[in-house]
Image (cartoon, helix red, strand yellow):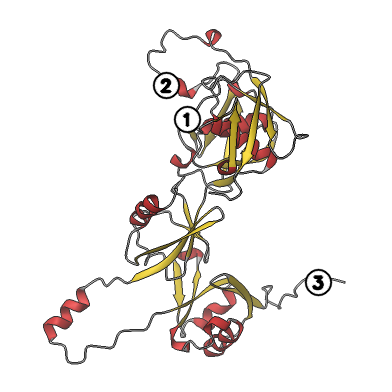
Amino acid sequence: MSCQTPLDPSGTLPFFAAQHEKRTIAIRRNSNYDATIDYIKKVFPALTGTPASRITISAVFQECGDLLVEINRDLWPDIVSRLSVVHISVDEEQAPELVSAPRKLTEELNNLVISRPIDIEIQVGSKTYPLTLPDNATVRHLKNIIETQVPLQTNRLISSTPGFSFLDDDKTLQDYGVKAGFLITIIANIRIHVANPRRRVSVMGTLYANVSSLRLTVSSRADIPYPNCVLSCGGELLDDSRRLDSYPQITAECEVEATQDDSAVIFFHWFSLVDMSHAYVDDYDLKPLIIRVQPEWDQDDNEEFAVYPESTVLDLKVLQYNVNHISPDRQILIFKGRELSNETDLQGAGVQSGDKIMMKMFTESL
């Protein structure tokens, strides 16, 4: 017996998904706007006592980019058949009109850009932080505020209600349709598809980690020797010493090309070192370090990882993340009784091949 939802003759589902706060409910398509609003009030108890005139339906259309567009009553019959996901929100009470205001004052009021404070939530991992700011604030201003109040690891933001990225720092929250109750998530880890002549793999990348972490992970998954692995995305070579989030083309589900360069060993971080004109590849230790990571909670689990002397602790955490699915911000690595910081390279920490590193885990993601 099939349990699939039947399609109507046009090939579309007979309903669209309506999101309000943290709930998503299927709403049957109805060309009658008022009837749709009435049904929305019934299925969302929080809206039961809300006047219909204050309930708005918005959606994102491909033709309008990432903008969340409010749909009015006149356009509803023409658009309802195209909708798949809509966002339900409540407009604040409108201020009474200034009936007796002098003409000059009325003109000045019309020319003002009026802002209203809105309460939104910022989600980082499993933690949520409340935030109040004016609705005409720019995305850049939002990021600056977040950075002062939240342990920000990366400035990649995405709206979870209804779901789009904040790509333009100069746009305002009004431009993006942000209203009271919006949940904005800080994205730290993304899935990246890696293509090379031998095979295609998907890996998890951490945006606040350097490209070296991605190269180490790709090397382990794509059978390309780490010293010879060269990564590029969107026609641009990726520099080991730069963070992934410094490349705008590195986004969720993006494609990175991995190639093997056998003619030379690529160490992009050399460009940041002082007076390396005398260095030769033969002088550099290319041998991997085979180290073991022992989870504190499971003495039988003893995973081995191949890293390199110049690999950072964060590189190792990202490599582990692709094996044990524990995000880097939840990993605490202990070597000889002391916690290792993300920026420390393994050689500087005194880690040698055959050594064992203990791993603890935060009970809650930061």
In the rendered image, the vertical position of residue 42 relative to residue 358, given as above or below = below
Would you name the residue on which mark 1 appears? 239
Residue 293 pos. (x, y %)? 67, 30
Task: Of the two numbered discs 3 and 2 on the same chain, state the one appearing first in sequence.
Answer: 3
Q: Amino acid at mark 2?
A: Phe
Which residue is at the far bottom? 100
Would you name the residue on which mark 3 appears? 3
**Which residue is at a point 21% across and 92% down the rendered structure image?**
99
Task: Of the two numbered discs 3 and 1 on the same chain, state the one appearing first in sequence.
Answer: 3
Of 188 and 86, nearer the camera is: 188
Residue 273 pos. (x, y %)? 41, 19
74 to the left or right of 252 = left
| Discs 1, 2 touching: Cβ within 8 Å | yes
Q: Which mark is residue 103?
A: none
Quadrant assignment for the N terminus? bottom right
Secondary structure under tag 1 reads: loop
Q: Amino acid at mark 3?
A: Cys
Residue 123 pos. (x, y %)? 50, 57
Would you name the residue on which mark 2 appears? 271
- Mark 3 is surrounded, within 10 Å at the Cα level, by few (under 14), some (14 to 19) or many (20 or more) other residues, namely few
In the rendered image, the vertical position of residue 277 relative to residue 106, given as above or below = above
